[in-house]
Amino acid sequence: MFLAINEMVHEKSRFALIAVVIVLVSYLVFFLTALAYGLASSYTRALDKWDASGVILSKNANNNIGRSLLFENDYRDLLGEDTAALGVGTATVGADASDDVALFGIDPDSFLGPEVSSGRALASQSEVVVSDELERIGVRLGDAITLQGADSQYTVVGFVDKATFQTAPVIYMTLDAWRAAASEVSGMSAMRDDTTISAIITRGEERGSYVSNRMSWQTMKDFTFALPGYRAQVLTFSLMIGFLIGIAAFVLAIFIYILTMQKKSIFGVLKAEGVSSGFIGWSVMVQVLLLSSGGLIVGLALALLTGSLLAGRVPFAVNALFFSGITMLFLGCAAFGGIASVRSVVKINPVEAIG
């Protein structure tokens, strides 16, 4: 330990350069991982809150909930304690023409009713509960909001923590209010049907045997991966980050190995003076662990700081499991480079090393 730390203090510039490389590489990997996870999560955060097992859509919807239409004759016998009707649509909040929202029509008494983080739950057709993502455009409790293309006004009575669907903030309203809003926004008020819903969300057992020829049931996982763009996005980011981690970890191992081999003559002198190979090898591993762990900690801290500064502007989300895996992989590759270096140190002939 003394030899390792003393050398790092004496050769500040060399070790500082290696440390900066580790910090930058780890910062890049941690930050991109958090961005990718945040973007993927923003597709399904509202769905994850339901703890649902599956979803029933119309068969001709091609697994797209936005194109699914179910009528009362289709779903009347399916509704129960473990099933709930859902209406889905899109709109633009009148207060911000650049911000689209997802409209969720629900029965407030069903398990789809959101758990509000502030305010209260829905109580009437003129009230809505909205994602706290809308607070950044100035929406507050008690505000009256409108949707572009619709005449009705809705009073915001509650906020839900990070409720998003396909990256858009969610506005929860009653099913009757959703039918009215969806028909007004689409310009088809004359074709409104007071029994229409988009889907039935299920909990518990598989519902495939209970649906008619016009409907199909699929697991929530399959439904999520069928969302437009979700699968391609997840696979693209996963491959990109996977290759980045692999290449960065390999480069880190090479850096450690080269750093050690540059000191071959120094190790030869130490061995000639009677210092054991085990002591020298231990000092090399201590340096590897100090550099790697220190660089990873600083890189992680910078990634978290950047995420906090960009909060609300980019979909940054931390997954402790992913971060732990990345950390273990980096440390493992650094240790591999250190072990390879130690094996070379053990084989050093003092006479040849000194020259």
Image (tube, rainbow, N blue to C red):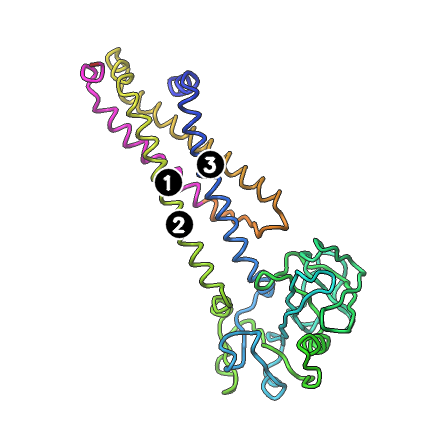
Near-viewer residue (251 or 351): 251
At label 2, which amino acid type do we have?
Gly
Asked if the stretch drawn in magenta spans residue 343, the answer is yes
Residue 24 marker = 3
Question: Residue 287, located in which quarter of the rendered image?
Answer: top left
Point out the tag, 1 or 3, that comes first from the N-terminus: 3
Q: Residue at x 71, y 69 (%)?
A: 148
At label 3, which amino acid type do we have?
Leu
Relative to 308, say whether 173 is above or below.
below
Q: Which residue is mark 2?
A: 242
Q: Residues within 10 Å of mark 2 (few under 14, many from 20)?
A: some
The residues tagged by marks 2 and 3 sit, at their Cα atoms, a distance apart of 17 Å
Q: Residue at x 72, y 64 (%)?
A: 129
Give the secondary structure at mark 3. Answer: helix
Q: Which residue is mark 1?
A: 249
Q: Position of residue 259 (x, y in %)?
A: 33, 26
At label 1, which amino acid type do we have?
Ala
Residue 26 marker = none
Number of marks in the rendered image? 3
Segment colored magenta: 325-354
Question: Residue 278, located in which quarter of the rendered image?
Answer: top left
Point out the tag, 1 or 2, that comes first from the N-terminus: 2
Question: Residue 158, located in which quarter of the rendered image?
Answer: bottom right
Location of the N terminus by quadrant is top left
Give the secondary structure at mark 2. Answer: helix
